[in-house]
Image: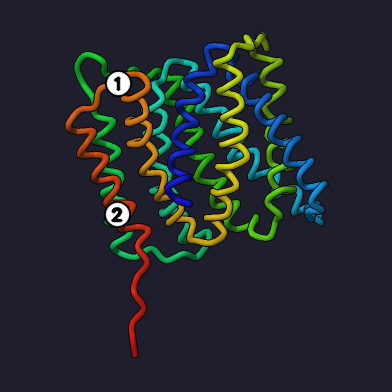
Amino acid sequence: MPGVFVFLWSTGFIGAKYGLPYAEPFTFVSIRFAIAGSVFAALALIGGAVWPRTPREWLNTAVVGVLLHGVYLTAVFIAIHRGTPAWVAALLTGIHPLLTALTAGWTLGERIRPLQWLGFVLGLGGIGLILWRTGPGGAALTGIGLAACTVGLFSLTSGTLFQKRFGAATDLRSGQAVQQLAAFLVVLPCAFLFETREVQWTGEFIFALAWLTGALSMGMFTILYTMIRKGAASQVASLFYLVPPTVALEGFFLFGESMTLKQIIGMMLAGVGVALVTRTPKARSG
């Protein structure tokens, strides 16, 4: 499950790069949320899923949807639409595990072991090496791109912690329906206020929309919520250290982007960091 999750999450940045030439970001994600929310609602109704019972449950579920879907995904799409390379967006939001570790202790009562802190440091160092590119072909990062990635980073962290604390008992089908539709209701007005809402229904856009909606909005987030329920939030968050190296590899094979020695070393450090953070300590005998 973790390996599939890392692969699917990484393809979200690639899918955005493929689809954004044919639709503006708010319009793109609005269509995505509307389709995913409708499908999840149908699945929940057909399968007899339990819906939130109290106004507080409805509100908590909607908040997670706005943070993880509405704000985080839209921010990443805006950054890539404004020229931020996909791998740079992945790297900047890849600091998410460190923020989660710093906040999980006092929000969820999770204990971070010394080896886990070492893993976070190594992972962050790996991210820094990959991001440190100079010379021809170096990545350009605009102020809007940096601001969007920063907003997405904090939304991803807070949404993960909020889901861990308040979303454990929510049915994944009905919960996802509420989250996707809540994100849709938040983002759609922005499409009317700031965009033309024109869409070029090319084969590339339809493929990107289908992949981002089916494999990611429906498949990947279901895997994410399942892992959050079964493991500590800080351990799940550490998997995000593997996303930027994966995006870099995908960019190399799909777009011919070269990788430097620093990037390769950074990938190795990130992998070691994830191994330390997710390692389960052996129980003492006797």
Task: Please provide percent x and percent y for residue 271.
Answer: 29, 48
Task: Please provide percent x and percent y for residue 40.
Answer: 73, 41
Label 2, residues with CA under 10 Å away: few <14, some 14-19, many ≥20? many
Which quadrant is the C terminus positioned in?
A: bottom left
Q: Residue at x 37, y 67 (%)?
A: 280
* Label at residue 125: none
Q: Quadrant of residue 177?
A: top right
Task: Please provide percent x and percent y for residue 23.
Answer: 60, 14
Q: Amino acid at mark 2?
A: Gly
Q: Residue at x 72, y 29 (%)?
A: 34
Q: Nearer the viewer, residue 9 or 100?
A: 9
Horizontally, residue 132 falls left or right of residue 99, namely left
Question: In the rendered image, which residue does mark 1 sit on?
Answer: 257
Q: Residue at x 24, y 39 (%)?
A: 266
Task: Please provide percent x and percent y for residue 210.
Answer: 61, 27
Q: Identify whether 199 is placed above or below 15.
A: above
Q: Quadrant of residue 285?
A: bottom left
* Label 1 SS: loop
Instruction: Tell which circle, 2 or 1, labels the residue nearer the N-terminal end.
Output: 2
Question: In the rendered image, which residue does mark 2 sit on?
Answer: 119
Q: Quadrant of residue 213?
A: top right
Q: Nearer the viewer, residue 238 or 19?
A: 19
Q: Residue at x 79, y 55 (%)?
A: 50
